[in-house]
Image (tube, grey):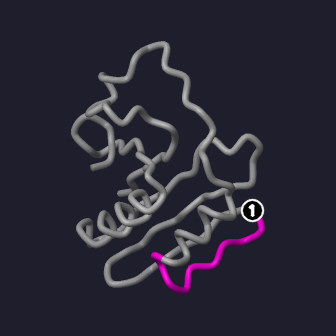
Amino acid sequence: MARDIYVQDIPFDANSVGDIPDDFEPLPLAYTPEQVREVIAAAAPGIEFDSAGWATYESDGIDLEVSVEDSEPFESFAFVDRSSNRAAVNDLIRSILDTLDLRAFDVDSDGGIFR
């Protein structure tokens, strides 16, 4: 079963989706799509993005699709997780998000925000 994780501007004081004010408007990300792809490539050696900004990474129970499309303004990117090793893929995603100082929505997590 796939799990979708959407990265965008999320208030750092929000512990759940319910903590985000109804009138909150996310800002564009402080990175270019290319910078994000470089961070992901450093965390997931061998990953290669196609011209549309999609990539697949498989390693040690990790099966992860990544979408970092070129857009202006650059407001979000996404992971589609089909991994059998949830701990390993969570560590990988956490490493990427920590490097970029970003947060993400996670449809499978308590509260809806990736931890």
Q: Indicate left or right for 32 with 17 as reference.
A: right
Q: Which residue is at 40% across, 41% downward?
A: 105
x, y percent for residue 24:
49, 20
| Boundaries of the magenta span | 43-51
- Callout 1: SS: loop
Q: How many labels does the image show?
A: 1
* Amino acid bearing label 1: Ala
Indicate the position of residue 62 as horizontal and vertical percent values: 37, 75
Q: Which residue lies furthest to the top in this view?
A: 23
> Which residue occupies 36% across, 45% down?
106
Residue behind mark 1: 52
Q: Nearer the viewer, residue 32 or 62?
A: 32
Is the residue 3 above or below the residue 94 in the image? Answer: above
Query: What main secondary structure does the magenta stretch of the protein show?
Result: loop
* x, y percent for residue 58: 45, 80
Tell me: residue 60, above or below residue 67.
below
Q: Would residue 56 appear left or right of 103 to someone viewing this image? A: right
Where residue 57 appears, as percent x and y from the top left, is: 50, 76
Residue at image point 40% right, 32% down: 11
Residue 68 sits inside the magenta stretch: no
Relative depth, front residue between 96 and 49: 96
Location of the N terminus (image quadrant): bottom left
Find residue 85 and report its image quarter: bottom left
Question: Residue at image x 60%, y 44%?
Answer: 29
Displayed quadrant of residue 112:
top left
- Dot 1, crowdedness within 10 Å: few (<14), some or many (≥20)? few
Would you say residue 45 sits in the magenta stretch?
Answer: yes
